[in-house]
Image (spheres, rainbow, N blue to C red):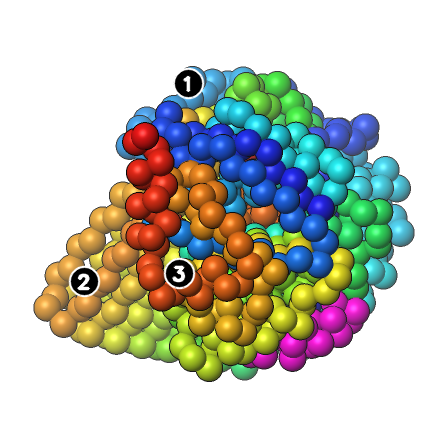
């Protein structure tokens, strides 16, 4: 039986419940961005020379760029000199076990519902935790390494597996890709690294939990996942931040590489602080996520549940290079109050018989704006490429907006691209029907919205699906007028 | 149980109900008949609390409470159930979960613990047998893609699950084939008891062959223009509405 009801009861918990701050000593560097700052970050992380050179090159490139303006979003100009680019909870450099983690930090993560120890052992999820600029702890490392899976922070990977990092970093999202990718390449501080060797099916969910804590800081994480031939991994990221009046910038880059017959399933439950009801504060979530199906029969699947952030700008994409490779994108984006989301995907078909599927569900409430923007491209060589896209929007109220921007570029006649879009409102009839059965309006809306999002929610690993459903319900509080 | 006194109701400024009086006691079955557009569904909606309708005059007492003061959901939780003439589809919401939510909301209102999955399932099995509804229907999204008959059967199943004090059934018989009609009518008969009142809205005598009403009323132009026992329905079947409506129209002119 389903959790709907418990979920509805818990939805009484109003507002953003992850908005607390952790009082902990933080090692921070002064605000501002210049070569010196980048050198300092690199030095603090004890990085090899090549890494610093790479960063500086990205920085030099970034300086030549201007912020993109094509997205359907509005915000005051970002002052990049007013951001702290490195903030790390103070702790011993290298942790040998979780017992050494500052108890205050552990409590923070307990509060967030992420237990780093026993509990997770039972549920079989390996977790990497990134607070502000650094990775705090990664669980299950040893068990994973026995089967050759590397799961650690990207900082550690740079130290211990430089050849892998050197080979793949920036291979899917080049530093020159876009404004925020260039910025990230220059200043990224931490993130997760996964390597699944040939033929290995990763036995547990790998997950990273991102938390912004320090004030005025930005978070620039970098994630790299490599799945060798015939391997499989399911990876999940979650994110929260304290409530603060000023906007904070989160500009991440995620790169996925799937070799022949490999499969990567990447799920996101994004719940950065969305700002208050008047639209004050909140995270600017400007993220570049891209995967490449490098080999034949490879598969990459993105699933995202986006409820947080003042502004979301992200388009998890798949380059379908290998023949017969598959790309999928499942998305639920919920916006409330003054939130803005411009999100979607790009499916770039290069190989023969490649297939992609896009299911995007946008839900807008309050005065929010919710845009789907998606590109499907079938190149000359993409013989028999197939795409199916479905974009559904649900409006709660009449002050919000839903927009769909599908771009289709087909360069060969054998490709078939299908696009369907619907926009609906929660009908008075539906509400009346629910209420006549004793389900009040707020609970009814939660029920209807969860029903609307179900196809996407079903793509999430079971336990996260329940979390995500609760999150959706909580985010919806007060959106019924 | 239910006492309707001189109810007038408007929609979009147009008066649809023009002084309805009706008393229903526990255990009774009343049938309301009347030509299309006479206001039968409107009466049902007004009792259920649909907000588009404005009640301009009159009172409704339900179980000693002022019904018109209660919210839609509280009326339902107090035991008023409406089987819709046109049940709506809610994509992605499974019928089972929907009904579970409804049952537990009602329990909460009455200070009872929510049913756990097992207890709920047990009750569901019993009621499924009662109204002869198929399990596979209940795991589908509520009413989505249901045939007309399946929707109606699902309404009666919900009635069985929610055990209302007063059930208003709006044309539950229309759109049913002969077998389905018999099954649904049998279900309703099994749900008939001395504590429960039923208000049947129908156009056809054939439903009343199965479910014998205690009283029959004819609604015309927003008023109950004739009341009687089940013989009235037979008379209507024979003569049509004209013999009543002509009388009424004539009376109105004089
Ligand atoms: N929004 C509205 N604006 C104006 N008139 C309306 C509106 N809604 C309903 N009506 C009118 O109210 C009258 C009564 O409708 P109602 O649905 O109650 O009839 P009914 O007796 O249930 O008919 P049927 O037997 O066809 O189901 C009809 O004439 C209908 O057109
Ligand atoms: Mg009607």
Is the residue at mark 2 in contact range of ligand 1, meaning its CB lies under 8 Å from it? no
Q: How far apart are marks 2 and 1 (CA)?
A: 37 Å
What residue sits 45% from the left and 32% below the top? B18
Badge 2, how many Cα within 10 Å: few under 14, some, many 20+?
A: some
What residue sits 67% from the left and 44% below the top? B2
Circle number at residue A77: 1
Q: Distance between the residues labelled 2 and 3?
A: 72 Å
Q: Is B121 part of what is drawn in magenta?
A: yes
Label 1: which secondary element: loop
The residue that disc 3 covers is B236
- What kind of secondary structure does the magenta stretch mostly adopt? helix
The residue that disc 2 covers is A379
Determine which quarter of the picture holds residue A350: bottom left
Q: Is B89 part of what is drawn in magenta?
A: no
The one nearer the camera, A171 or B135, is B135
Looking at the rendering, in which quadrant would you find the C terminus of chain B? top left
For this view, does B104 lie left or right of residue B33? right
Q: Is residue B15 above or below residue B216?
A: above
Magenta-tinted stretch: B117-134
Q: Where is residue A439 in the image (x, y as percent from the top left)?
A: 63, 47
What residue sits 27% from the left and 56% below the top? A420
In this rendering, which labeled residue sits more in front, label 1 or label 3? Answer: 3
Q: Which residue lies furthest to the front in this view?
A: B254
Is the residue at mark 1 in contact range of ligand 1, meaning its CB lies under 8 Å from it? no
Label 2: which secondary element: loop
Q: Where is residue A107 in the image (x, y as percent from the top left)?
A: 84, 42
């Amino acid at each position: 039986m389903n959790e709907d009801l418990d979920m509805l009861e818990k939805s009484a918990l109003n507002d953003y419940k992850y908005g607390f701050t952790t009082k902990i000593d933080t090692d921070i560097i002064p605000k501002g961005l210049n070569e010196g700052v980048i050198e300092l970050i690199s030095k603090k992380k004890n990085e090899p020379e090549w890494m610093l050179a790479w960063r500086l090159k990205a920085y030099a490139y970034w300086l030549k760029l201007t912020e993109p303006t094509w997205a359907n979003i509005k915000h005051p100009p970002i002052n990049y000199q007013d951001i702290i680019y490195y903030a790390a909870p103070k702790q011993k450099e290298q942790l040998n076990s979780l017992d050494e983690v500052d108890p205050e930090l552990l409590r923070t993560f307990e509060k967030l519902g992420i237990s780093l120890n026993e509990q997770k052992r039972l549920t079989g999820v390996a977790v990497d935790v990134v607070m502000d600029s650094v990775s705090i702890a990664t669980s299950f490392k040893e068990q994973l390494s026995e089967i050759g899976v590397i799961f650690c922070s990207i900082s550690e990977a740079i130290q211990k597996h430089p050849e892998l990092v050197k080979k793949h970093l920036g291979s899917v999202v080049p530093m020159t890709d876009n404004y925020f990718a260039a910025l990230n390449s220059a200043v990224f501080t931490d993130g997760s690294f996964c390597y699944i060797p040939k033929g290995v099916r990763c036995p547990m969910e790998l997950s990273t939990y991102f938390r912004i804590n320090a004030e005025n800081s930005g978070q620039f994480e970098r994630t790299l996942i490599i799945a060798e031939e015939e391997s499989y991994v399911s990876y999940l990221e979650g994110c929260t931040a304290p409530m603060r009046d000023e906007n904070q910038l989160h500009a991440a880059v995620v790169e996925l590489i799937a070799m022949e017959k490999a499969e990567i399933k990447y799920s996101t439950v994004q719940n950065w602080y969305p700002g208050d009801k008047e639209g004050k504060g909140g995270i600017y979530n400007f993220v570049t996520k891209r995967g490449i199906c490098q080999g034949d029969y490879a598969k990459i699947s993105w699933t995202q549940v986006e409820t947080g952030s003042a502004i979301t700008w992200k388009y998890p994409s798949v380059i379908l290079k290998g023949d017969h490779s598959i790309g999928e994108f499942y998305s639920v984006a919920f916006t409330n109050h003054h939130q803005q989301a411009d999100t979607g995907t790009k499916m770039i078909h290069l190989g023969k018989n490649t297939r992609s599927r896009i299911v995007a569900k946008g839900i807008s409430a309050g005065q929010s704006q919710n845009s789907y923007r998606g590109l499907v491209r079938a190149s000359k060589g993409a013989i028999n490429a197939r795409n199916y896209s479905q974009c559904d929007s649900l409006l709660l109220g009449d002050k919000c907006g839903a927009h769909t921007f599908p771009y289709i570029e087909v360069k060969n006649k054998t490709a078939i691209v299908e696009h369907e879009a619907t926009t609906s409102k929660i009908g008075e009839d539906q509400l009346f029907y629910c209420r006549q059965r004793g389900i009040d309006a707020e609970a009814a809306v939660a029920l209807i919205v969860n029903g609307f999002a179900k196809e996407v929610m079903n793509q999430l690993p079971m336990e996260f699906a329940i979390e995500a459903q609760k999150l959706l319900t909580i985010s919806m509080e007060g959106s019924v007028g | 149980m239910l006492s309707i006194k001189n109810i007038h109701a408007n929609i979009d400024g147009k008066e649809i109900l023009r002084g309805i009086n009706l008393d229903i006691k526990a255990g009774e079955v009343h049938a309301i008949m009347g030509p299309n557009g006479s206001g039968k569904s409107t009466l049902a909606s007004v009792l259920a609390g649909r907000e588009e309708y404005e009640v301009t005059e009159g009172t409704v007492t339900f179980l000693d409470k002022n019904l018109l003061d209660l919210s839609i959901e509280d009326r339902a939780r107090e035991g008023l159930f409406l089987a819709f003439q046109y049940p709506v589809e809610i994509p992605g919401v499974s019928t089972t979960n929907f009904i579970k939510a409804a049952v537990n909301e009602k329990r909460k209102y009455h200070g009872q613990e929510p049913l756990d999955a097992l207890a709920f399932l047990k009750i569901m099995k019993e009621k499924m047998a009662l109204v002869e509804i198929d399990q596979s229907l209940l795991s589908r999204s509520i009413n989505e893609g249901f045939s007309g008959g399946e929707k109606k059967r699902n309404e009666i199943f919900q009635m069985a699950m929610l055990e209302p004090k007063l059930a208003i059934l709006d044309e539950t018989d229309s759109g049913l084939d002969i077998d389905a009609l018999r099954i649904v009518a049998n279900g309703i008969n099994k749900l008939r008891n001395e504590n429960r009142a039923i208000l049947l809205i129908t156009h056809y005598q054939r439903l009343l062959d199965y479910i014998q009403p205690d009283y029959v009323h004819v609604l015309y132009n927003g008023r109950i223009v004739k009341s009687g026992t089940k013989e009235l329905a037979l008379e209507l079947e024979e003569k049509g509405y004209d013999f009543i409506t002509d009388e009424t129209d004539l009376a109105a002119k004089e």
